[in-house]
Image: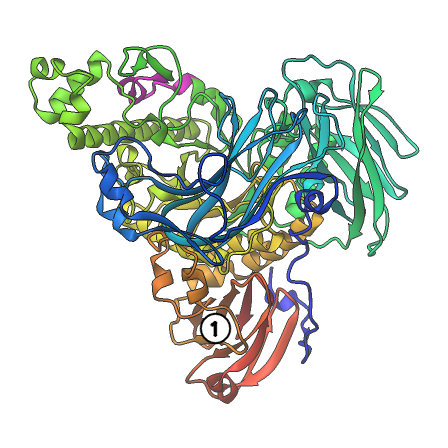
């Protein structure tokens, strides 16, 4: 897109105030339920010296997870104390002086807990636990239902399971930190749908502000999540939509079937969609079916009610409401070098007309990449649109491919989790048949790669015993005498190194097979493991048995996810952490340095900004901001981690993609310029506000040295300069001063993505020119 083709208009001298976000994440279903009268308050208390502690009241458990010989010494650095205005939980940094058998810091918890009796007929209702606290450290709310076994709920909200009579709710300070807990409330919320009946909810806006905006005169996807009791079989399930005037159904995915569509009342057969859900007695976020809706109205501020719900075996269940609105449609070109797109978990099983509409929406929004499992019809549209398509198969994931022979043997002599022996998995061509079939449907192969779940699990087969003996130069007969029970304890460091090299050989074999099969098909194809950001850090010892230091040299592409920065959700009230999103920018910079250091060739990094994975969400501005974080850091691509949102979110991403398309040549080819300076021209949060709650700066070491939450990356070529300036304060726009030294004469300061410019001079630029930055936004200024 040429800059000369853009109409430039005069930048207004006074910019009007605007909302900091297109969506208010404090207005969620959970927040609305918490404010309603229909709740039972079980505990509501401000913590003071008069608060009761002990059996049947508050408790303050402290623990070192796993067995540790220095347990008592570690816990001597963990304390709690009552003060006039709350309970202080303190875990000092001295715990980092201790190490586990793996060389990692011990996992230490400092908790405030309460076990409460549940009232009769509580099953199926929602239990919430809210702790008001402040301070420094990583803290989270958890719930365990009793009697068990029930899984630990890593959230402050949970559906009460059948048979539960008690619940233990607790706030956990993990690792070093110092927080003060002021108050706590534990309540049960009522539900409109009986707990023993299935339900449906618009995903994700049904549990956000219950509003859903569509672009004008464009087919647009709306996803749903379904809930069922897996012990029951449901027949004659229908999804019912009552659409307001001006809105209509234009299609659905193949798990749904349109039965009738007249006068705004839509009836879709949903037996297959319901049967495909894999979650029991809760909404299944892994298999959300979708419909395509279109607004034939002009953009306006008016909202209209859409009702939706289920009919099961002739019985119509309570309906929900979603307010529909229409927004102006905007568009952007896709970048030519950088890949920007979506990683979608489901809903891509589309017929041709729906596939054409969905691909047109993505392309018009400036996207050019998709990760998921599309139908043949959608795959054809993606190929025709020159989209990068990334996929995978479930049998090759998390470090160790699945199969039956030869088995990955655990310490008990049994196969561990259907995994294959790493020696066999590392043989060239071992998975060619599986990969050849998969690569016919995708450009690159990728899957989750959390291999740490196999730490210390094996493989303890005879072949691995022989290989370990050769690796360590220990006589095999001597090794067999301690194999497998004692081998890790006696030869820990050698075992960890051996396992990491075994894993690196698997990576090398997969990349060789995939790239070779791609060449046979006339395409460039690569293996893209999806790694935790925590594994790509000099500061942590996480993941030593599959260290990226050993396998990055075998790759051309890698997906590194995290940090995740979600701020609200279905079971999480909005929480504000100053500068939360600045830590993302600083961490991806740290990741880039790590990958560059340990790769023997240039590696393209794919980032994964948090969208709506599971039931948590980010505001649209944050997703766009993190996408540009990845772009400016030098990543090759950025894929949003699930994007089941309305057009407010698409609008912000379209704006971000337009910026990337306009400025990628300058960012990629112009030399960096350190002479340009930026400073806040009005009050703004400082790095101290972030350091006040950040438990550790190990993953974002730059936070210790930066002096502003306004960040700058500048590039210069001859008499032209590009300044990218980021405002990481989610609460407010800011005014800044941009200083460019050693210039003379007259200049134009352009913002081509907005079609705006202003005149200035070298004298003004040297003194500092005042500019405006919206909240959570990277703005670009071309001089």
Q: Is residue 420 magenta?
A: yes
Looking at the image, which is closer to me, 262 or 387? 262
In the image, residue 577 above or below residue 546: below
The quarter of the picture where the N terminus appears is bottom right
Asked which colour scheme the image uses, the reply is rainbow
Looking at the image, which is closer to me, 154 or 464? 154
Rendered location of residue 210, percent (x, y): 74, 44
| Residue at numbered disc 1 | 721
Rendered location of residue 340, percent (x, y): 54, 47
Asked which secondary structure carries label 1, the reply is strand
Q: In this view, does 299 lie to the left or right of 6?
A: right
**Residue 347 seen:** yes
Looking at the image, which is closer to me, 344 or 199? 199
Looking at the image, which is closer to me, 216 or 536? 536
Identify the residue at horizontal 29%, vertical 29% (top origin): 503
Q: Quadrant of residue 705?
A: bottom left
Q: Quadrant of residue 54?
A: top left
Rendered location of residue 588, percent (x, y): 41, 52
Q: Does the magenta stretch include residue 403?
A: no
Crowding around mark 1 (Cα neighbors within 10 Å: few <14, some 14 to 19, many 20+) is many
In the image, residue 212 above or below residue 328: above
Q: In which quarter of the image is residue 274?
A: top right
Identify the residue at horizontal 24%, vertical 16% (top origin): 460
**Residue 588 seen:** no
Residue lying furthest front:
50
Give the residues drawn in magenta, as a range: 419-433
Q: How many marks?
A: 1
Residue lying furthest right:
263
Rendered location of residue 488, percent (x, y): 19, 25
């Amino acid at each position: 897109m040429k800059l000369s083709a853009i109409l430039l208009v005069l930048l207004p001298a006074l910019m009007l105030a605007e909302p900091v976000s297109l969506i208010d994440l404090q207005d969620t279903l959970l927040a609305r339920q918490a404010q309603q009268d229909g709740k039972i308050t079980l505990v509501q208390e401000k913590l003071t010296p008069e608060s009761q502690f002990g059996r049947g009241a508050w408790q303050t458990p402290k623990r070192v997870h796993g067995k540790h010989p220095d347990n008592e010494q570690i816990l001597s650095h963990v304390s709690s104390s009552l003060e006039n205005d709350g309970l202080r939980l303190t875990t000092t940094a001295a715990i980092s002086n201790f190490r586990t058998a793996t060389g990692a810091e011990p996992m230490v918890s400092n908790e405030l807990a309460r076990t409460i009796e549940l009232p009769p007929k509580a099953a199926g209702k929602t239990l919430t636990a809210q702790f008001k606290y402040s301070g420094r450290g990583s803290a989270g709310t958890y719930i365990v239902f009793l009697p068990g076994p029930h899984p630990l709920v890593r959230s402050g909200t949970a559906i009460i399971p059948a048979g539960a009579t008690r619940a233990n709710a607790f706030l956990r300070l993990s690792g070093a930190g110092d927080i003060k807990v002021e108050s706590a409330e534990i309540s049960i919320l009522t539900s409109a749908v009986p707990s023993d009946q299935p339900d449906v909810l618009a995903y994700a806006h049904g549990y956000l502000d219950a509003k859903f905006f569509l672009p004008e005169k464009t087919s647009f996807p709306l996803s749903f999540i379904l809930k069922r009791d897996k012990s029951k079989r449901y027949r004659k399930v229908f999804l019912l939509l009552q659409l307001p005037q001006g809105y209509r159904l234009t299609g659905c995915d193949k798990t749904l079937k349109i039965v009738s569509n007249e006068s705004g009342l839509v009836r879709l057969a949903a037996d297959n969609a319901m049967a495909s859900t894999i979650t029991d007695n809760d909404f299944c976020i892994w298999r959300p079916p979708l419909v395509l809706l279109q607004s034939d109205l002009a953009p306006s501020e008016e909202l209209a009610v859409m009702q939706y719900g289920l009919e099961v075996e002739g019985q119509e269940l309570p309906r929900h409401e979603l307010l529909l609105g229409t927004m102006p449609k905007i568009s952007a070109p896709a970048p030519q070098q950088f890949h920007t797109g979506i990683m979608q978990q489901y809903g891509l099983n589309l017929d041709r007309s729906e596939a054409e509409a969905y691909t047109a929406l993505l392309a018009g929004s400036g996207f050019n990449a998709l990760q998921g499992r599309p139908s043949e019809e959608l795959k054809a549209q993606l190929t025709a649109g020159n989209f990068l398509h990334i996929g995978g198969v479930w049998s090759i994931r998390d470090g160790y491919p699945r199969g039956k022979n030869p088995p990955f043997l655990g310490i008990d002599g049994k196969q561990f989790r259907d995994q294959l022996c790493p020696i066999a998995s590392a043989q060239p061509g071992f998975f060619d048949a599986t990969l050849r079939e998969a690569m016919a449907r995708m450009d690159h192969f990728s899957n989750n790669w959390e291999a740490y779940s196999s730490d210390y699990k094996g493989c303890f087969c005879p072949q691995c015993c022989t290989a370990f003996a050769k690796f360590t130069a220990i006589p095999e007969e001597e090794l067999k005498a301690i194999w497998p029970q004692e081998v890790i304890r006696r030869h820990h460091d050698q075992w960890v190194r051996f396992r990491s090299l075994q894993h690196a050989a698997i990576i090398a074999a997969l990349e060789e097979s995939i790239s070779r099969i791609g060449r046979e098909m006339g395409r460039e194809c690569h293996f893209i493991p999806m790694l935790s950001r925590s594994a790509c850090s000099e500061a942590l010892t996480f993941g030593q048995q599959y260290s990226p230091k050993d396998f990055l040299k075998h790759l051309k592409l890698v997906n590194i996810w995290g940090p995740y920065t979600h701020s609200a959700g279905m079971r999480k009230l909005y929480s504000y952490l100053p500068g939360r999103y600045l830590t993302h920018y600083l961490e991806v910079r740290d990741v880039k340095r790590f990958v560059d250091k340990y790769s023997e060739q240039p590696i393209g990094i794919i980032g994964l900004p948090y969208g709506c994975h599971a039931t948590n969400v980010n505001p649209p501005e944050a997703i766009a901001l993190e996408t540009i974080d990845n772009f400016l850091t030098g990543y090759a691509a950025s894929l949003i981690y699930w994007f089941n949102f309305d057009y407010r979110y698409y609008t912000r991403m379209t704006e971000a993609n337009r910026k990337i398309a306009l400025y990628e040549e300058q960012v990629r080819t112009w030399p960096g310029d350190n002479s340009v300076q930026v400073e806040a021209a009005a009050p703004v949060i400082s790095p101290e506000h972030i350091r006040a709650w950040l438990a550790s700066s190990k993953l974002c070491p730059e936070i210790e040295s930066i002096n502003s939450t306004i960040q700058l990356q500048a590039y210069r070529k001859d008499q032209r300069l590009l300044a990218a300036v980021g405002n990481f304060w989610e609460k407010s726009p800011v005014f800044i001063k941009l200083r460019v030294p050693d210039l003379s004469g007259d200049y134009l300061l352009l913002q081509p993505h907005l079609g705006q410019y202003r005149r200035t001079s070298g004298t003004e630029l040297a003194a500092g020119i005042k500019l405006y930055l919206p909240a959570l936004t990277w703005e670009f200024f071309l001089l």
